[in-house]
Amino acid sequence: MTKIKLYKCWKTMLSLTLFGLFFSTSIFAQSTIRGKVTDEKGLPLPGAGVAVKNTSASTVTNPNGDFTLTSTTTNPTLVVSFIGYITKEVVANSANVTISLMADSKALGEVVIVGYGQQKKSDVTGAIAGIKGEALLEVPSANPIAALQGRIAGVDISRNSSRPGAGGQIRIRGNRSLSGTSDPLIVLDGVPFGGSVNEINNDDIASIDILKDASSTAIYGFRGSNGVILITTKRGRVGKPVLSYNSYYGVSQVRGQYDQFSGPEFVAFRNAASPAYTAGYSPLELKGIAEGVSTNWQDYLYNRGFVTDQQLGVSGGSEGVTYGISA
């Protein structure tokens, strides 16, 4: 009897010990980090992104610049970013941290195109976003709309077709009309352009600036009510002719296919679903069943696609005139 009691006592203590170890591991496996993100003057930065490096844990600051984040690592490295400020990495060695971000003077010093000329980004109060032509060429794309996709905040770009090289539509801050058009006004080198952005060669674009709000589009009147896209093309420079050639070749294919029944699996499934199946199988189906044929129709539907693009241009000029030709 004593041995049985000791065995039960030992078993209970072992269970409690294992439970305590598991519970303590769960407690110490996660830690809550609280903090505040400010600018150089100590003012809070609402909407700043805070993420734990090399993990999926992330959050944004509230209107007071405060944030709360749960981490599964000890002394995690926080990556803090905000538009117009330099991204900063901070080791969170305490439960409460205060992070100060410095303004990105380089980004604020960029020159953007506005409706009445050029200004520094730091001097513009309206909602303006832009991208340089070099950035459009970083990823091979068939047209400017495809190159802009996911590059500019507040601009929605959707594809009208899945065909290679197909265009799309641009919406600046959503649809603004139920019956009328929501297409933005396109201004090409200072002149309203009646065509599509897709008609412009990627290699010919020096910069694209997008005017979003009323203060920046007011100069264009009602035509700018859906936003304005300002496109500046490259110009020839004084000197000897410069010949440029850009080419790329790519392959596109479906990332994955849906799982489906094989031939024998489909026959077994149909027989199980309807044991009294009276319609019978066609002679062709009976032949396939006998031979164990399995056809994956997705292999016939999805083929590998090949994409290629060739761009050739020449530019130059003299004191009196400059030129640029591309095809």
Image (cartoon, rainbow, N blue to C red):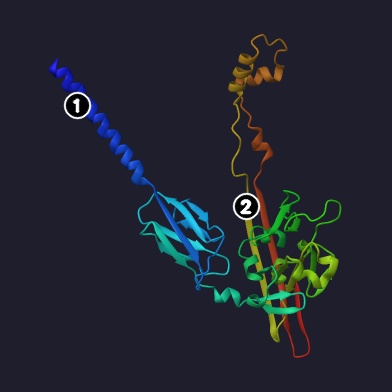
> In the image as oriented, which residue stretches furthest toward the bottom?
319
Question: Callout 1: helix, strand or loop?
Answer: helix
Identify residue for label 1: 10
- Identify whether 142 is placed above or below 133: above
Q: Residues within 10 Å of mark 1 (few under 14, many from 20)?
A: few
Residue 122 percent across, percent down from the top left: 63, 76
Which tag is nearer the camera, tag 2 or tag 1?
Answer: 1
Residue beneath the point at 79% across and 56% down: 176
Disc 1 residue type (three-letter): Trp
Disc 2 marks a residue whose amino acid type is Val
Residue placed under numbered mark 2 in the picture: 251
User: Which quadrant of the figure contains the N terminus?
Assistant: top left
C-beta proximity under 8 Å, tags 2 and 1: no
Give the alpha-carbon distance from disc 2 to disc 1, as whole Å: 66 Å
Nearer to me, 242 or 63: 63
Label 2 neighbour load within 10 Å: few <14, some 14-19, many 20+: few
| Residue found farthest to the front | 64
Q: Is residue 91 above or below residue 12?
A: below
Q: Quadrant of residue 180?
A: bottom right
Identify which residue, 228 or 289, lies in the foreground: 228
Q: Position of residue 309 (x, y in %)?
A: 69, 61
Q: Nearer the viewer, residue 241 or 83?
A: 83
Does the rendering let one see residue 173? yes
Q: Residue at x 63, y 47 (%)?
A: 253
Mark 2 secondary-structure assignment = strand
Residue 53, visible in the rendered structure = no
